[in-house]
Amino acid sequence: MSDTHLPRRARELPAPLPAELPQADVVVHAGDWVDTATLDLLERRCRRLVAVYGNNDGPELRARLPEVAHAELAGLRLGVVHETGPARGREERCAARFPDLDVLVFGHSHIPWDTTTSTGLRLLNPGSPTDRRRQPHCTYMTAELAGGRLADVTLHRLPPR
């Protein structure tokens, strides 16, 4: 997930997300939390959290989270960052900046994204579960790993609030 913007865009995470947290082996958050309460909740409820701060996150969150996070997950090299710049040229920029990753999860735009660069880097943006902006739905993603690769990536649309 990314861009939760709590409590500004919603008072709490949409019900499907907290229900899925304990079932996931790893939860990824690509920044713009806004409040520390959501970070506290995820740290309590997740087996493993890989997370970064975003441009709307203040000093408390920046003290607890990195700008870029890396994790090795069953042979998959994962990176997380909030901002990747404009959509135009994103694949080339990210491939050059993160040559040693298999998957990069990013946020900021609130626009779901799933592409693969010419170097094989998979770029994923789960959108936002609380602030759809110009998108038809609020969203988040789930993925499964098999053999050190992403076997299934699903974009979940949340019902209107």
Image: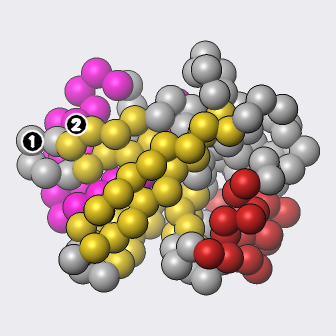
Are the residues flagged by discs 2 and 1 in contact, CB closer than 8 Å? yes
Residue 50: % across, % down? 52, 70
Measure the alpha-carbon separation of dots 2 and 1.
Answer: 8 Å
* Residue type (three-letter) at the residue carrying disc 2: Glu
x, y percent for residue 126: 51, 44
Q: Which of 153 and 117 is in front in this view?
A: 153
Q: Mark 1 points at which residue?
A: 118
Q: Residue at x 72, y 70 (%)?
A: 42
* Residue 25 image offset from top left, x and y in percent: 52, 78
The reply to whether the magenta stretch includes residue 88 is: yes
Question: In percent of the image, x 67 and y 76: which residue is there?
Answer: 22
User: Mark 1 falls on what kind of element?
Assistant: loop
**In the rendered image, which quarter contains the C terminus?**
top right
Q: Which stretch appears magenta?
A: 87-109
User: Could you say whether the residue bearing mark 2 is in a helix, strand or loop?
Assistant: helix
Identify which amino acid the numbered label 1 is placed on.
Answer: Ser
Residue 52 visible in this rendered orientation of the protein? no
Q: Is residue 4 above or below residue 74?
A: above
In this view, the residue farthest toward the top is: 134
The answer to whether residue 15 shows anywhere in this view is yes
In this view, the residue in front, 68 or 148, is: 148
Residue behind mark 2: 91
The residue at 31%/46% (across/down) is: 123
Q: Does the magenta stretch include residue 97?
A: yes
Rendered position, 121 above or below 151: above
